[in-house]
């Protein structure tokens, strides 16, 4: 359980990190909090020749609201994002997702961008990014590009990041509906462990209570976190009747292709997906009613 | 062939320390093998068990999930740093003993660090808050109840002092 030898370099700036990646290509790996990467190194699932540390980079630490987006720097630690009032106010679903991410001892090191770039199929932040249709900024010595979270996540532990690219920030849309509510549901062996299945929903309504915007996503029950934007669109224009929410949750679960493992069979995961999606939708609707 | 080493300097339990280690040396191995501070236990070595929990700048972290070289110049507190200056047990440590909060003792250093971190932030934690604080530390002996009791006992004793 010891990492294979590697050369270590602390990046002095984002440009320096990108230069290192351009120079070393697939031989190099970025490390920020290391909460996912270090176990993979210890198990020798990965053995990069170079490790480039970006943990303390000031350029990747900012949290800001820019127009209708909450912009979170890739190296913002999860505990910092969790405690940030801007995050809670502007994208409450992200706060709720963070509540489920690991334990205090891992959130103190782990970063928002690290979790996204690791792309674990059960990662809560990936689910939040997918269902809210966050935009991710990827930088390399060649330039910067922005991709939608749904395109960023391409499979289990797989993203569209090229070997020379660094995730710079994640931009979460801020909903400006008359009223909105959200909920995040999860089942895991122990709170803070990997989700067996998680589901989240966000709903917006107008003054008359008619749905104007809806999002639903499920994690842990397929190769990657998945948003169900077509199904969610069916809710727009309705009054979010319970029967309809149940139907949408069932249909979302039916579209999944979960796999079984030691913790949960594929059938159990599909069952959980339907139950948690329903709870998430109902929870989001309940919050609507309570909000001013 | 010997592996290239890097000089790492940290502040551990209030003392400036340094060591020449390969970059792949985790903090827990640096503490145990270089500094001979063997109070911190290496358990699963992939971030699940919590036995290796230490404080980094006052916040609990897993010392198996960070390379020592990443922490240049930073402050670490290990279980050795919890005891009183004369080496006697702290109130929390003594409460673990009094409440029978350990059997094999493997998880104990991590439990103590997590519990101390909680008490530093919250002098009168509820059972629920104690359970959340130690939720990342696995114990395979006690069933956790005595550990929760020990942390409560420590909080009561500290309030009386």
Image (cartoon, coloured by chain):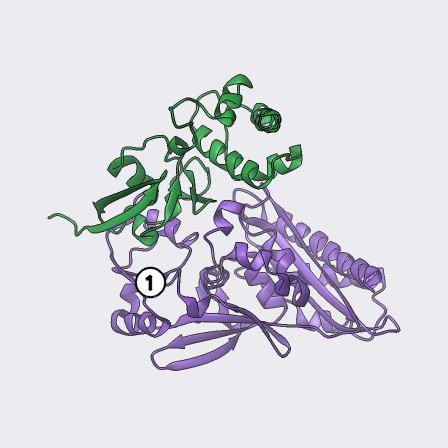
Chain colours: A purple, B green
**Residue drawn at the location 63% of the way across and 65% of the way down:** A86
Q: Can residue A263 be seen by looking at this rendering?
A: yes
Q: Is residue A163 left or right of residue A4?
A: right
Residue A238 falls in image quadrant: bottom right
Q: Is residue A177 left or right of residue B42?
A: right
Q: Can residue B135 be seen by looking at this rendering?
A: no
Chain bearing tag 1 is: A
- With respect to residue B153, does A107 lie above or below? below
Nearest the camera: A249 or A125? A125
- With respect to residue A116, does B105 lie above or below? above
Q: Position of residue B124 (x, y in %)?
A: 64, 34
Residue A82 falls in image quadrant: bottom right
Q: Residue reaching furthest left?
A: B1
Q: How many marks?
A: 1
Q: Give the labeled residue for mark 1.
A: A29
**Residue drawn at the location 37% of the way across and 63% of the way down:** A54
Nearest the camera: A163 or B39? B39
Q: Residues within 10 Å of mark 1 (few under 14, many from 20)?
A: many
């Amino acid at each position: 359980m010891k990492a294979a030898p590697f050369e270590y370099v602390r990046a002095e700036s984002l440009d320096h990190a990108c230069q290192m990646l351009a120079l070393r290509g697939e031989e190099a790996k970025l490390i920020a909090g290391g909460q996912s990467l270090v176990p993979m190194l210890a198990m020798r699932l990965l053995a990069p020749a170079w490790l480039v540390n970006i943990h303390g980079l000031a350029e990747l630490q900012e949290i800001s609201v820019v127009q209708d987006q909450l912009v979170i720097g890739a190296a913002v630690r999860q505990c910092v994002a969790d405690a940030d009032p801007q995050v809670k106010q502007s994208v409450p679903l992200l706060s709720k997702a963070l509540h489920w991410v690991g334990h205090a001892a891992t959130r103190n090191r782990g970063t928002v961008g690290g979790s996204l770039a690791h792309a674990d199929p059960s990662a809560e932040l990936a689910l939040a990014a997918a269902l809210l249709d966050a935009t991710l900024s990827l930088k390399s010595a060649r330039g910067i590009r922005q991709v939608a979270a749904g395109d960023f996540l391409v499979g289990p532990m797989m993203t569209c990041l090229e070997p020379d690219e660094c995730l710079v920030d994640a931009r979460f849309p801020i909903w400006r509906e008359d009223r909105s509510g959200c909920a995040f549901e999860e089942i895991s062996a122990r709170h803070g462990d990997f989700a067996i299945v998680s589901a989240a929903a966000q709903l917006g309504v107008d003054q008359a209570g008619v749905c104007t915007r809806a999002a639903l996503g499920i994690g842990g029950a397929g190769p990657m976190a998945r948003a169900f934007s077509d199904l969610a669109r069916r809710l727009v224009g309705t009054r979010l009747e319970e029967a309809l929410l149940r139907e949408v949750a069932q249909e979302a679960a039916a579209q999944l292709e979960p796999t079984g493992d030691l913790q949960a069979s594929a059938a159990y995961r599909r069952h959980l997906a339907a139950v948690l999606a329903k709870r998430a939708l109902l929870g989001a609707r309940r919050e609507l009613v309570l909000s001013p | 062939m010997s592996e290239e080493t890097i000089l790492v300097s940290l502040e551990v339990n209030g003392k400036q320390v340094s060591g020449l280690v390969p970059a792949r040396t985790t903090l827990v191995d640096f503490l145990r093998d270089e500094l001979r501070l063997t109070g911190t236990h290496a358990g699963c070595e992939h971030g699940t068990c919590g036995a290796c929990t230490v404080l980094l700048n006052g916040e609990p972290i897993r010392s198996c999930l960070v390379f020592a070289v990443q922490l240049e110049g930073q402050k670490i507190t290990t279980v050795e740093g919890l005891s009183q200056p004369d080496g006697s047990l702290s109130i929390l440590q003594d409460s673990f003993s009094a409440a029978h909060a350990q059997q094999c003792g493997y998880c104990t250093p991590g439990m103590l660090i997590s519990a101390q971190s909680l008490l530093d932030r919250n002098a009168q934690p509820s059972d629920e808050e104690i359970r959340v604080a130690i939720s990342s530390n696995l114990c395979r002996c006690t069933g956790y109840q005595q550990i929760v009791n020990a942390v409560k006992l420590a909080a009561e004793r500290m309030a009386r002092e």
